[in-house]
Image (cartoon, helix red, strand yellow):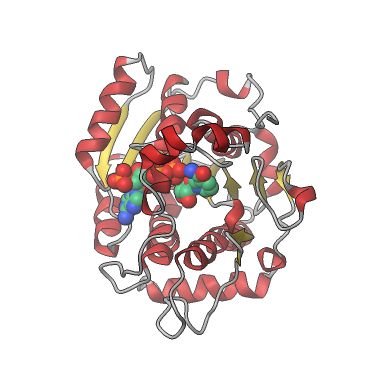
Amino acid sequence: MPKPLLCPPEILARDLSGKTFVVTGANSGIGLTTVEQLAKQGATVVLACRRVSEGERARDTIVAAGAKGAIEVFELDLAELASVRRFAEKLLAKHPTLHGLVNNAGVMNTPQGKTKDGFETQFGVNHLGHFLLTELLLDALKRGAPSRVVAVSSCYHDVAQGRFGKLDFDDLHFEKRKYDGWEAYAQSKLANVLHARELAARLEGTGVTAVSVHPGWVRTNLISATMPRWVQDYVLYPVFRLSGMIEPWEGAQSSLYALLAPDVEAHAGAYFSQRGMYRDKSANAGGWPMRSPNPEAHNDAAAKKLFEVSRAAVGLA
Ligand SMILES: NC(=O)c1ccc[n+]([C@@H]2O[C@H](COP(=O)([O-])OP(=O)(O)OC[C@H]3O[C@@H](n4cnc5c(N)ncnc54)[C@H](OP(=O)(O)O)[C@@H]3O)[C@@H](O)[C@H]2O)c1
């Protein structure tokens, strides 16, 4: 099996004392291992979780393992804009300066549904909730510059189980077309890539660098809307592992690199990918950064339009 990309050890040995990071969806999977590493390096890390009890359980485990940095748990439900606003207000009252935001939380291939504000679930949680969160935290990130915004996207922004990633501006919420869980996931993950691209352009000169990442195919709870997790972990695991599935620690490497590697500043707006499954097989090896094989990921007009449409949708226009 090909080896995943791993961060150079010096990046993961850097002292992060005095730095504050926010990681969404930090109670499990890739987010949890990202937090573990940042806390090990001495950073203060805020776990933004929709289930506070799960966040606290994760915090206790990390503390028991000997984390150097402080770990705090704040409630954040990305499926409700009011929750995003409450989270930002509470966070900024305690941490007016931030050094990194990892927009990691996500859902995949969910049944058709809507967020509290009436957005299609995957577009609402994976993109619009994070979009509002990022806008509300921008001043704090500017105060902490040099700082980073990392959008955890997916190679599925290119093609998800045969459905090509594209934004349908006439029907972002699947009200006119037939709902397809993979198509909705691909759309939301393309939105993550375009959000980082446009954000980077808008933040030029501020010291805040925005990028997007693909973490790899990682053994996490993300599969649970598609199949029970035990089927992934015990029945299909040998085949999945041989086909390239990696562990959460390996899956956190792209986020950690995007957050901590010095050269990332020279690649604002770029896409950093672990090994992936792309329509152009030559891209499968990944790269930090690499050019997305999806032509739509390079569509600046779409990125600008998405930004404006998103501002209006979350009530900032
Ligand atoms: N695993 C992969 O193969 C893979 C591949 C490509 C990209 N990704 C991306 O990686 C990111 C992390 O996923 P993962 O694989 O680590 O899966 P995971 O273990 O399921 O983690 C997802 C996290 O997001 C949280 N979340 C879901 N809905 C939320 C909401 N409405 N508000 C706040 N938090 C919410 C979950 O909270 P609960 O525990 O409460 O559900 C969980 O903490 C996702 O953005 C995913 O799209 C993963």
Residue furthest to the left: 53
Q: Is residue 229 left or right of residue 237?
A: left
Is residue 199 visible from the viewing direction of this image?
yes
Q: Count how many numbered circles sit on residues in the image.
A: 0
Q: Is residue 211 left or right of residue 24?
A: right
Q: In the rendered view, tell whether residue 119 sits above or below residue 251.
A: below
Q: At 24% across and 36% down in the image, what residue appears?
A: 54
Is residue 20 visible from the viewing direction of this image?
no
Q: In the rendered view, tell whether residue 167 sits above or below residue 20.
A: below
Q: Position of residue 307 (x, y in %)?
A: 52, 70
Q: Is residue 266 left or right of residue 48?
A: right
Residue furthest to the right: 282
Residue furthest to the front: 235
Q: Position of residue 313 (x, y in %)?
A: 39, 75
Q: At 35% across and 72% down in the image, what residue appears?
A: 119
Name the quadrant of the N terminus.
Answer: top right
Name the quadrant of the C terminus.
Answer: bottom left
Q: In the rendered view, tell whether residue 44 sits above or below residue 299.
A: above
Q: Position of residue 300 (x, y in %)?
A: 67, 70
Q: Position of residue 202 (x, y in %)?
A: 59, 62
